[in-house]
Amino acid sequence: MLSTRTGRLLALEALARPETGTIHDVLRDAARGGRLVELDTEVAAGAIHEATTAEVPLHVNVLAITVTRPNDLLQALSPALKATSRRPADVTIEVTPPFGGLNRAALLDGLMTLREQGFRLAFDGAGDGDLPLSIIADVVPDMVKLDAYLLQGVPGNPAVVALIEALGHLAGRTGIRLAAVGVESEEQLAVLSKLGVPVAQGNLMASAQVGPPTYVAPEITRLDGVPAGPGGPLVADLVHPAVTMPEPTTSEEVRQVFVESPEVTSVVLVDSGKRPRWSLDRSRFLLAVTGPYGHALHASKPAARHADPPRTIRADASSIELLEAVGEGEGARAGDDVVVVDPVGRCVGIVRLTEVMRGVAEAKVEQAVALNPLTRLPGTGPVGREIERRIERGEMFVVSWLDVDGFKQVNDTKGFAAGDDLIRAIGRTLSDLSARLAGTRVAHVGGDDFLVVTEVDEVGTLATEVVDQAWSAEGMAVSVSLASLVCAVGSVGSYREASRLLAPLKKRAKEVGRSSWVLGRPRSDRVDVLRGRVMRAPA
């Protein structure tokens, strides 16, 4: 599963594939023999065992009927989690049809049991199965996956596009992540991204693999899987035009380019779709082909014989992400140019690491001056610039204001040291979120106020981590208020306007009892209370 916005690997889905027939045939035979739930739990545990590497979250399919017997499922999954060093929070249980004929209360109880154990929940097959919308509303799962059959109507069927858009509105208001299955074309991917569907899987991004998963795409070595964090200019700010040549290009043709253009540091060999296949570093290539007998040995042979797999990065990544992804210990390739690609992997330029390092160093000095001494979080400057950048790029985003309720009372009752400890704890939680979520940026406005900008699909995680947390200061329970403004493309014109529209939302959040989360939109009077208890005036 990949992000439709950044191309980042988000999760792996482990599926059972029998050597003969289909998994549906196997499950049907098990049902006839009265062993359906038993087999389904064994398959789910086996999927966890096969996904032996735990770098990315894992999705495991489970039939809805199996969820009605959660104890049997947990008994099978627990040993598999222990053997693979995974936590329940790293695993999403994808609940698959059929749902018809099941005891609704047993299904809901099973889902709640799994959630209490720490598992994340997803519903599969939305749009072409018997998944009740009321179940989605009752459970509010972490993810809902659109059926692959539905995707066949994208982008040509306006009714299907409208249906996905409606589900996108539901997801935006509830914090559910919407995922599309079966993405086969760039047109589908573009429409899904515009409709606010943040996650996609299908043959366009990567085809299914048999056996334990690998994390290297078949065409290019990706460097954009590192969680995003603030720092330095964007890669897009440092791009140089790339010299590209067809993959079958000969060594002599590449040599001519290097000889005639001394400023060219690398040549990128691309396929017919403009996707980078190989990268040729100037120094190493000329050393190989211009030595004794080099011309005779190599001139007419493919230049790819002297090439390396390209190191790639998305244009919207930060320069610090690039340096972290390249890392140390690259040997002879430490200073190689990095190929910049667009959302579907086409070459759009190169970046030179020396320029990136210089830009990062300047940004680090600027950031150090702006950090809050208590939380080590930046002030509003970097987040304000990030909001302006997203507005300029025509992106949808959410900006949120987090405030500690009654913070003065904490200081007056427990002392300033206890208040500082509380603010530091909230700051650490927000810092961790910023490191984990690719589209999240955090600022400490001052005192007990924090500003957070996120992708639409990330704001639900923000609320879970900060609003649902039991905060306290030396035994004194503390609640927080979160006000979120969903900024659709073109709905706000500046960071200043977004901050002005947040102010009444923050006031509304403070009026809700307990820890609260309210969500609004520009040019709309509607405010959704997603967490907390609405206080009613006495009769």
Image (cartoon, rainbow, N blue to C red):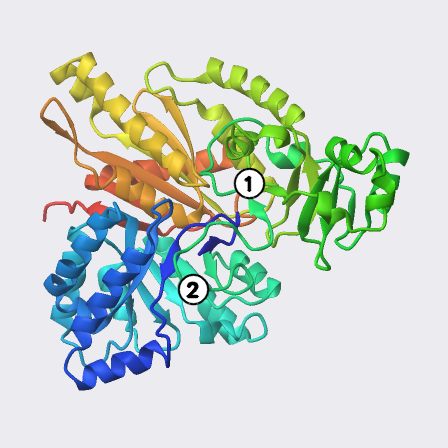
User: Within 10 Å of the Cα at label 2, are there few (<14), some (14-19), or many (20+) other Cα atoms?
Assistant: few
Sequence-wise first label, 1 or 2: 2
Q: Nearer the viewer, residue 217 or 195?
A: 217
| Residue 408 coordinates in the image, percent (x, y) | 21, 20
| Residue 191 at x, y percent in the picture | 56, 62
Q: Residue at x 52, y 61 (%)?
A: 192
Depth check: give the residue in front, 499 or 114.
114
Task: In the displayed orientation, state which residue is furthest to the bottom.
Answer: 32
Horizontally, residue 229 falls left or right of residue 173, namely right
The answer to whether any part of residue 198 appears in the image is no
Residue that carries the numbered disc 2 in the rendered image: 210
In the rendered image, residue 131, in percent from the top left (x then y), is placed at 30, 73
Judged from this view, the residue extending furthest toward the front is: 293
- Name above or below for residue 256 compared with residue 408: below
Q: Residue at x 42, y 60 (%)?
A: 179
Q: Disc 1 designates what residue?
A: 390
Kindly identify the amino acid type of the residue bearing the numbered disc 2.
Val
Tell me which corner region of the image, top left, top right, bottom left or bottom right, holds residue 19.
bottom left
Q: Identify the residue at image location x=30%, y=31%.
A: 429
Element at badge 1? helix
Q: CA distance from mark 1 to mark 2?
A: 39 Å
Q: What residue is at 60 percent from the left and 43 percent from the top? A: 393
Question: Height in image: 450 above or below 170?
Answer: above
Quarter of the rendering occupied by the N terminus? bottom left
Mark 1, mark 2: which one is toward the viewer? 2
Q: Position of residue 137 (x, y in %)?
A: 26, 63
Residue 248, which numbered label? none
